[in-house]
Amino acid sequence: MADLMEKITSLAKRRGFIYPGSEIYGGIGGFYDYGPLGTELKYNIKNQWWKFMVRQRDNVVGLDAAIIMNPDVWKASGHVDHFTDPLVECKNCHLRFRADKVGKECSECGGEFTEAKNFNILVETYVGVVEGAKRKTYLRGEITQGVHVNFQNVLSSTRLKIPFGVAQIGKAFRNEITPGNFIYRMREFEQMELQYYIKPDEPEGQKWFSYWKEQRWNWYVSLGLNKQNMRFRDHAPQERAHYAQAATDIEYNAPFGWNEFEGIHHRGDWDLSQHSKFSGKDLSYFDEATKTRFTPWVIETSAGADRATLFFLLDAYFEDGKRVVLKLHPKLAPYKVAVFPLVANKTELVTKARSIFEQLRSLDIVTAWDDRGNIGKRYLAQDEVGTPWCVTIDYDTLTDDTVTVRDRDTTKQERINIGKLGEYFQHKLA
């Protein structure tokens, strides 16, 4: 299994999915850059999440809050006082580790550890232009709070009624003690979250907690993630935050063990009540139907976009002899189609292939062009980056207006009329 992680890391860099951050300067721990194909893949994951969570529902809206907020936000949320990890330091080599992730001695040199101390993982920054008068604040440690501090703004500017949700995708930052496992644990990462506001009623809480667990599981399965590699893990009472009434993780069986990549949390009224208390603003909700006022409860779904990207890559990786295939769901694949002229030195073939390439792109089908080497090598190259279909323009095309369409997963080929190509791929991608 560890070998699979090495293969994915190598493929990701070689084929332009993910690069080490600032690599020419020796890199920087916990930061990665997405290359051309990785940018497309991660965009597709976020886009599918947004369609599923926002566009297909009439009671969920979107938000894009600022990364830097008033520092009092983080005092109210408890992050300033409680957003900590236990840290130990090796007395010999002075490397630092999370105490809950190490054994009895240093894995680097075998040295003895210091006693564990709590380390706040919020990333500090300063705002202002005058040296010595700058105000300390933080890069957000999670995107959640940007939604809650805008609760009344969303209510007053929309026609939403409880239950309703506010969705957000955005960057968050944590000064992780020991980032690792490629893009699984980073210091800069991206989250996809829904804050779903409900009546403060126990049956309602149980209903919506169960509903969102099922919805989020089904979303991953619908995009091809093997459910045999997934599981729910409920948090034990001592694991949960003091305000949480229930919490569960969706975990994936990664090469480095079962690890969480999405959490579903019943947060009660903690967020709105805390921000009401610290800001002095009323963040309650008035129910016109019952003529009652209350502070809503929150059911949260919080997914890591980077972790999802990693697990979709791991799950899609397949070897068939010398052929390496990323069996990504077509909706996630960076390129949907690759277009090949049979040979690159025949003007008629290249011209025809170019017209088909432009035709598919005009239909908003992300299409690659490849005229390098022989057809067999081109197929293998596209298999390795997950392109579901390859279209070859050959000499028969010039006489009968048909092309060869080759399927990534089965390698089967069929002849399709050029005039029907757009409809053919749009149906496949629907």
Image: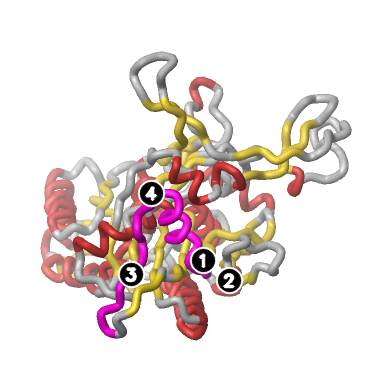
Dots 4, 3 in contact, CB < 8 A: no
Cα distance, mark 4 to mark 3? 26 Å
Q: Is mark 4 on a helix, strand or loop?
A: strand
Cα distance, mark 1 to mark 2? 6 Å
Dots 1, 2 in contact, CB < 8 A: yes
The residue to which callout 3 is attached is 285
Q: Which of 345 and 405 is in front in this view?
A: 405
Dots 2, 3 in contact, CB < 8 A: no
Q: Earlier in the sequence, mark 4 or mark 2?
A: 4
Q: Is mark 3 on a helix, strand or loop?
A: strand
Residue 267 circle label: 1
Q: Earlier in the sequence, mark 2 or mark 3?
A: 2
- The local crowd at label 3, few if under 14, some if 14 to 19, many if 20 or more residues have their Cα within 10 Å, is some
Q: Where is residue 162 in the image (x, y as percent from the top left)?
A: 32, 75
Q: In this view, does 323 lie to the left or right of 90?
A: left
- The local crowd at label 1, few if under 14, some if 14 to 19, many if 20 or more residues have their Cα within 10 Å, is many
The residue to which callout 4 is attached is 170
Say which quadrant the N terminus sits in.
Answer: bottom right
**Is 418 colored magenta in this rendering?**
no
Front of the two marks 4 and 2: 2
Q: Which of marks 1 and 4 is nearer the N terminus?
A: 4
Q: Quadrant of residue 140?
A: top left
Q: Earlier in the sequence, mark 4 or mark 3?
A: 4
Q: In this view, does 426 lie to the left or right of 374?
A: left
The residue to which callout 2 is attached is 245
Dots 1, 3 in contact, CB < 8 A: no
Cα distance, mark 1 to mark 4? 20 Å
Q: Nearer the viewer, residue 183 or 360?
A: 183
The amino acid pointed to by label 2 is Gln
Cα distance, mark 4 to mark 2? 26 Å
Say which quadrant the C terminus sits in.
Answer: bottom left
